[in-house]
Image (cartoon, grey):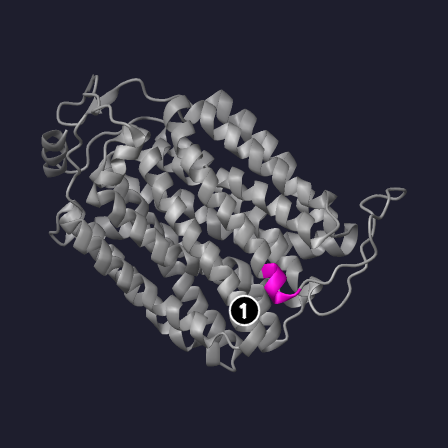
């Protein structure tokens, strides 16, 4: 497989499987729904902090389970930790599920689980209830990226994978854009419970679309001759033996160090704008939308960036690493965000950092297909997602304690600015040149 990959790369862009961009569009929509679901609570959080929010029934005549909720920073951090612990636990099984059942059957299962959990938030009436609902949301959402990366590896040639990943990963930014636009309006007009129910319909439509449209390519294209041939199977190895390879740990450490920063952006920016610049729920949309519009552009451009470096004469893997270095450097200015007094200067730096993260994410996910055969990508991605979720599970309650005790975001932004350069150093040390793992059955 290594020889075929090198030979095909040397001949430039080969013909590719027809219909692959439709697959990419479906992955984009799923990721958008995924991120809308996980954003709803963070957008409502400023309204649940520091004062009592009177909860109205969803529809006239429906019972109101309680009269008010008050949610502290520490409680919110613990709720986020419940989500990320579940995410870490679930992703191990989700990756194996997708590898065993395939993307066509496995992806709708995890999508259905997270959608039911997201709607379940509308049924709770205590902080503990939010924690339970968040836990099951984490279990379901853990399957999105293992399934999406595996589908990308099945349908796209190596040179297009980072771009395809960048496109579907931009759904994270689009979801984060749609959430602050829709959630406040829905909450103010129909009550907060309706905010958790709105995505359920879209998830159901997506699942039907996926089951009708998605098929795994039974054969892979011989890019060198333009013919269809059966690809050689990867060695069959026990899933846990993949932890023996340095390449697995390189990916895991990269996710462990950088995923908490993205979780921090997703879960704490509404609170940051509220506490630092006194932006309330009604006016929260413009700054958040700006950050995530730019992050969406960064995801697509970051996925394209390796092709730009290839045009300068770099090999594919050197171009991948150069793109990751570019993204890591662009995050560094965020270190000063904790002390800013200008709301829109903060928006500018956060937009740059979020865009750079998404570009980084598109490329670090694609390193799995650089280093492992497609048959094992779901499992390797799941290991990285576990590491990233555990990092977030530690980071979120720490952030809550830091803010509760000091009221300062400075330490959190200092870590955020340095994390990517550190992660790249560790990745290049453990997997020099993104060398392909030599699997032994």
Judge whether 353 appears above or below 304 on screen. Answer: below
Q: Nearer the viewer, residue 21 or 2?
A: 2
Q: Image point 69% across, 54% down: which residue?
A: 127
Q: Position of residue 430 (x, y in %)?
A: 19, 51
Where does the magenta region start and end?
72-76
User: Label 1, on which residue?
Assistant: 401
Quadrant where the N terminus lies? top left
Judge whether 100 appears above or below 32 on screen. Answer: above
Residue 402 visible to the viewer: yes
Judge whether 215 appears above or below 50 on screen. Answer: above
Residue 407 visible to the viewer: no
Q: Secondary structure at mark 1?
A: helix
Q: Residues within 10 Å of mark 1 (few under 14, many from 20)?
A: some
Q: Is residue 73 magenta?
A: yes
Q: Quadrant of residue 3?
A: top left
Q: Position of residue 294 (x, y in %)?
A: 44, 60
142 horizontally vs 423: left or right? right
Q: Position of residue 149 (x, y in %)?
A: 36, 37
Q: Image point 55% across, 50% down: which residue?
A: 82
Tell which residue pokes out farthest to the right in this image: 61
354 horizontally vs 4: left or right? right
Q: Nearer the viewer, residue 24 or 46?
A: 46
Q: Nearer the viewer, residue 302 or 395?
A: 395
Q: How many marks?
A: 1
Q: Position of residue 28 (x, y in %)?
A: 45, 40
Q: Image point 47% across, 30% down: which residue?
A: 107
Q: Image point 53% across, 26% down: which residue?
A: 209
Magenta portion: prevailing SS class: helix
């Amino acid at each position: 497989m290594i020889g075929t990959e090198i030979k095909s790369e040397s001949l430039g862009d080969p013909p590719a499987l027809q219909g692959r961009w439709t697959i990419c569009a479906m992955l984009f929509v799923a990721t958008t729904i995924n991120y809308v679901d996980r954003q709803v609570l963070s957008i409502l959080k400023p309204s649940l902090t520091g004062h009592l929010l009177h909860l109205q029934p969803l529809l006239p005549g429906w019972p109101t389970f309680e009269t008010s909720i008050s949610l502290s920073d520490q409680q919110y951090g613990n709720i986020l930790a419940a989500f990320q612990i579940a995410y870490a636990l679930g992703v191990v099984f989700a990756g194996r599920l997708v590898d065993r059942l395939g993307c066509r059957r496995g992806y709708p299962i995890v999508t259905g689980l997270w959608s039911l959990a997201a709607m379940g938030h509308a049924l709770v009436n205590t902080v503990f209830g939010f924690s339970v609902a968040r836990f099951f949301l984490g279990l379901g959402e853990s399957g999105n990226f293992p399934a999406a990366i595996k589908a990308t590896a099945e349908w796209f040639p190596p040179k297009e994978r980072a771009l395809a990943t960048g496109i579907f990963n931009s759904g994270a930014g689009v979801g984060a854009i749609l959430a602050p636009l829709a959630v406040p309006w829905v909450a103010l007009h129909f009550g907060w419970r309706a905010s958790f129910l709105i995505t359920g319909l879209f998830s159901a439509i997506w699942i039907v679309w996926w089951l009708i449209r998605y098929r795994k390519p039974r054969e892979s294209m011989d890019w060198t001759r333009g013919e269809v041939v059966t690809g050689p199977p990867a060695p069959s190895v026990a899933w846990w033996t993949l932890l023996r390879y340095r390449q697995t740990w390189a990916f895991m450490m990269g996710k462990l160090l950088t995923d908490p920063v993205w979780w921090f952006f997703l879960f704490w920016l509404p609170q940051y704008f509220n506490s630092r610049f006194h932006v309330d729920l009604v006016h929260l949309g413009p700054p958040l939308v700006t950050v995530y519009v730019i992050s969406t552009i960064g995801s697509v451009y970051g996925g394209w960036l390796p092709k730009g470096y290839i045009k300068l004469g770099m090999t594919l893997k050197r171009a991948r690493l150069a793109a990751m270095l570019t993204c890591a450097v662009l995050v560094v200015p965020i270190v000063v965000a904790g002390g800013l007094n200008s709301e829109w200067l903060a928006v500018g730096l956060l937009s740059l950092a979020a865009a750079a993260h998404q570009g980084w994410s598109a490329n670090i996910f694609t390193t799995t297909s650089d280093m492992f055969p497609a048959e094992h990508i779901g499992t390797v991605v799941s290991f990285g997602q576990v590491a990233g979720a555990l990092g977030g599970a530690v980071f979120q309650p720490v952030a809550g304690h830091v803010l509760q005790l000091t009221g300062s975001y400075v330490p959190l932004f200092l870590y955020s600015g340095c994390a990517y350069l550190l992660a790249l150093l560790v990745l290049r040390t453990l997997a020099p040149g993104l060398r392909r793992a030599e699997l032994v059955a």
